Image (tube, grey):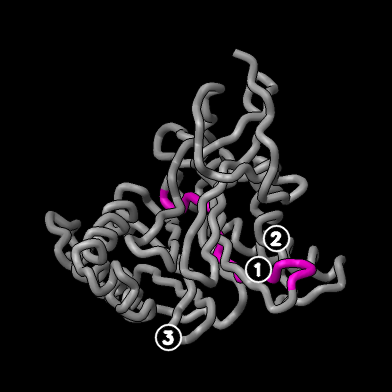
Amino acid sequence: MLKKRPDVPRGICMTLAAVFIRRVPNRQNRDELVVVADTTLTGGQRFDQGTKILQLPRGDALFCFAGLTYYAYPLAMQLASAIGSYNRSVEQRHPLRRVVQHASRIFAQSFKLIHHTPSDGLPVDMPASFLFGGFSWHDNDFKIWKIAMDRQGRRFPLEDINRRYAFIGTAEALPEAEERLAAMLNARGKTEQDLDMEPFEVIRDIIRAGKYDDIGGVPQIAKVFRYMTTHFYATLWPCPDGRTRPHAFGRPLHGWEKTSWTMFDPDTLHFNAVRPPDPA
């Protein structure tokens, strides 16, 4: 049985996720955008195979969400549907910034259409936040945006992230994630401009520490490249039986199950890892 914390209701602010611009080591002027998240969903029970990284119906961007799943996930599907129904956007002729601005409007519209609300006339306080990351051909650079619910204002304001990374998720975990990242960079003599895989390492280590009931499972990871293509990776992670298997969004693949996703080793940080043998 999950332990309930009195200050934050269980299942409301679940997740720890990050979007960051990675400087690839030993590659001059080579950046790529990485999205990472845990896979745990809670709400009276625990499910460690939750998909929290989603691809827009265009190859230049990814986004992730935090918050109450039965609220945040329908918003994400509404956005995907809106983009998928407009060829100019699907074909990447519509600038990515406008797509994210449209996301803010769609979320706000959906929020206002909630009915049968509590006595104060506002929908139930269900925090939902999103991080978007992609390569903007209009800016010729990687961009990160955040959209978070403003319940009182009945809106989802859009925030440009002017740093090379951003975290969203469980309120208590965010300061710890920032502190861990700062300490890691300091120990390595690096600055934010030199980010490699440190934000991923922070989330991986917090998952393994098991400190938060609503952050767990297997870290899921995906990338956006400068040539406006995305790629998801299968994370190699130990199962309860002790065997290390590739996981897709937290789900261990069957031994006979094939995937086009590249294997990712969360310890060596190798993106072209070898899949371990899985005896039948």
Q: How many C-alpha atoms fall within 10 Å of the one at disc 3: few (<14), some, or many (≥20)?
A: few
Q: Name the residue under label 2.
A: 197
In screen coordinates, is 214 left or right of 204? left
Q: As rendered, which of 160 and 43 lies closer to the eye?
A: 160
Identified by mark 1, the residue type is: Arg
Q: Secondary structure beneath disc 3?
A: loop
Position of 69 relative to 28 (above/below): above
Identified by mark 3, the residue type is: His
Q: Distance between the residues labelled 1 and 3?
A: 20 Å
Q: Secondary structure beneath disc 1?
A: strand
Question: Mark number for residue 138?
Answer: 3
In screen coordinates, is 242 left or right of 259? right
Question: Mark number for residue 241?
Answer: none
Pair 2/3: label in front: 3
State whether residue 187 appears in this view.
yes
Q: Mark 1 points at which residue?
A: 22
Residue 18: x percent and y percent?
Answer: 56, 61
* First-in-chain label (2 vs 3): 3
